[in-house]
Image: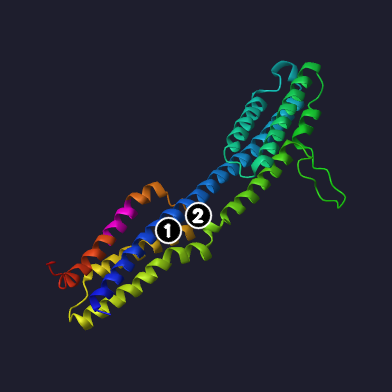
Amino acid sequence: MHPVVVLRRLRAGVLAAVVVTALLYVVVSTQAGGQVAAAERTDTAIADIAEAREEAGRADRALADVSRTGAGHLIGTGAGFTNAVARVSSLLTSATAGNAAGQRGLNHIQFVQGQLTTCKQRADAAVRDGSGMDLARKELTRGRQTGHAREAVPFTGGLMASLDDLKGIQERAVDRQRASRWLNPALFWPLLVGPPAVMLVLVAASGRIVARHFRQYPSPALALAWLATAAVGTVTGVLCSVDRSASAAPPAPDETMAVVLPLLAAAGALAYLAYRPRLAEYRFPRP
């Protein structure tokens, strides 16, 4: 086969590798970025639930202070309790946006919100009746019930215990999010470095043909095109690997695409121009 024909086919292969790299970059970065963004929302929800647990503790201490001073008939449940309850309600509403446990998670959040309402109602009733705050505090601090195996049954305790259970559900859900196949190195690394590896073989073959049959040095533009393509796959893979460790922000596809796609377009242009001088030597006008 004539070297020019081989070079044309190699050029087509190199350009195809650049195009495939661009397509796989878009798919992997978008999917992985979406999974990590969802996990970050769930992390925020978990932090909200943990803070709500602390606020529930403050509400209990506020009721204890009211009981100790016996001033419920004068100050009601107290500003400390009212503010803590309002803060718990706000944090639970905020946590709903990051729920990763599906309908089950939403149901549990609604259940906990119902417990909060019950606790507030009992505290208000204690003020009206002049009775103690024991029932209201019990709604906050009651321990979980145990099952047949003497294991604690989730969501059978008071508000504070239920918040702990809710946090555990979201933590298990975010672990599943971070175990997504799009964050699995066994999947995304072959997808990202496969086309550049094939392109390297094609570039090496092109250089050999140019050196042996054309007695010329291979064009540096071809090496630059491969370096740009390989850099895109490698950097994207590293970002996905770091994101899997839950210690970095997602790749932000909308932002990185503004840089990566023009870079790959430039790589394609460089690859095309690198072959042009040799192929032009065998271009003759048609009769």
From the top left corner, tell me how far across and down residue 136 is, in percent.
77, 28
- Quadrant of residue 94 in the image? top right
Depth check, front residue: 80 or 145? 145
Which contiguous range is marked in magenta?
259-267
From the top left corner, tell me how far across and down residue 93 is, in percent.
60, 33
From the top left corner, tell me how far across and down residue 193 is, in percent.
42, 66
Badge 1, how many Cα within 10 Å: few under 14, some, many 20+? Answer: some
Circle 2 residue: 247
Residue 92 visible: yes
Depth check, front residue: 133 or 51? 51
At x 82%, y 21%, the residue is 131
Element type where label 2 sits in the image: loop
Q: Is residue 143 left or right of residue 224?
A: right
**Disc ID at residue 282:** none
Q: Is residue 207 left or right of residue 39?
A: left
Q: Residue furthest front?
A: 287
Circle 1 residue: 24
Total marks in image: 2
**Relative vertical location of residue 243 with respect to residue 152 in this rendering, above or below:** below
Q: Quadrant of the N terminus?
A: bottom left
Q: Residue furthest bottom?
A: 212
Depth check, front residue: 139 or 194? 194
Element type where label 1 sits in the image: helix
Amino acid tagged 1: Leu
**Relative vertical location of residue 149 with respect to residue 214 in this rendering, above or below:** above
Task: Examine the structure image and report whether residue 261 is included in the region drawn in magenta.
Answer: yes
- Quadrant of residue 179 in the image? bottom right
Mark 1 and mark 2 in contact? Answer it, CB < 8 Å.
no
Q: Quadrant of the C terminus?
A: bottom left
